[in-house]
Image: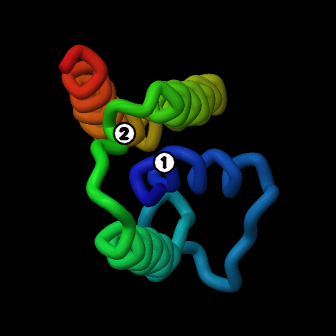
C-alpha cells in the first residue's frame, strides 16, 4: 500500500487533486502522509495475521484468487507509474517501480510455488 502511494501521491499533487497546507518534502507530499499509510498498512496486516492464527491451519498461498490479487496490485501500480511518466514525474515513477516490483515478484513466486505443490 505504501509502496504504491510513493508513485500515486506525487501524481495526484501534480494533477491538482490533492493539496496540503505546506508543500511536502517528497514531490510536494508531506512525509507524515507516508508514515500514516505505513502505520495503517502495518495495523491492517497485524490484525489480519492475529485473526489468521485463530483459523484452522491451511495454506492460503495456494488459493488461485491470490494470483488475481497480485495482478490487480501490479496493474494498479503500473497505471500509476505510467501516469507519473506522462506527467514528467520520472523520479516518483522510478521509485514506484522499485518499491512495488519486489512485492509483485515475491507474491507471484509464492503463489506459483504453492499452487505447484
The residue lying furthest to the top in this view is: 116
Characterize the local packing of mark 1: few (<14), some (14-19) or many (20 or more) Cα atoms within 10 angstroms: many
What residue is shown at x 74% (from left), y 70% (from top)? 19
What residue is shown at x 68% (from left), y 77% (from top)? 20
> Does 102 sit left or right of 31 as displayed?
left
Q: Quadrant of the C terminus?
A: top left
Secondary structure of the residue carrying numbered label 1: helix
Q: Which residue is mark 2?
A: 100
Q: Which residue is mark 1?
A: 4
Q: In this rendering, is residue 83 above or below 48?
A: above
**How has the structure been colored for display?**
rainbow
Q: Are marks 2 and 1 in contact (CB under 8 Å)?
A: yes
Spatial CA distance of label 2 from label 1 is 6 Å
The residue lying furthest to the front in this view is: 56
Secondary structure of the residue carrying numbered label 2: helix
The residue lying furthest to the right in this view is: 17
Is any atom of residue 81 visible in this view? no
Amino acid at each position: 500500500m505504501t509502496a504504491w502511494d510513493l508513485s500515486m501521491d506525487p501524481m495526484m499533487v501534480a494533477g491538482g487533486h490533492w493539496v496540503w497546507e505546506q508543500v511536502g518534502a517528497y514531490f510536494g507530499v508531506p512525509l507524515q502522509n507516508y508514515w500514516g499509510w505505513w502505520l495503517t498498512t502495518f495495523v491492517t496486516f497485524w490484525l489480519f495475521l492475529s485473526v489468521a492464527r485463530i483459523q484452522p491451519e491451511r495454506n492460503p498461498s495456494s488459493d488461485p484468487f491470490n494470483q488475481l490479487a497480485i495482478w490487480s496490485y501490479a496493474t494498479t501500480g503500473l497505471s500509476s507509474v505510467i501516469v507519473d511518466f506522462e506527467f514528467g514525474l520520472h523520479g516518483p515513477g522510478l521509485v514506484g517501480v522499485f518499491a512495488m516490483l519486489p512485492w509483485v515478484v515475491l507474491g507471484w513466486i509464492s503463489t506459483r510455488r504453492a499452487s505447484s505443490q
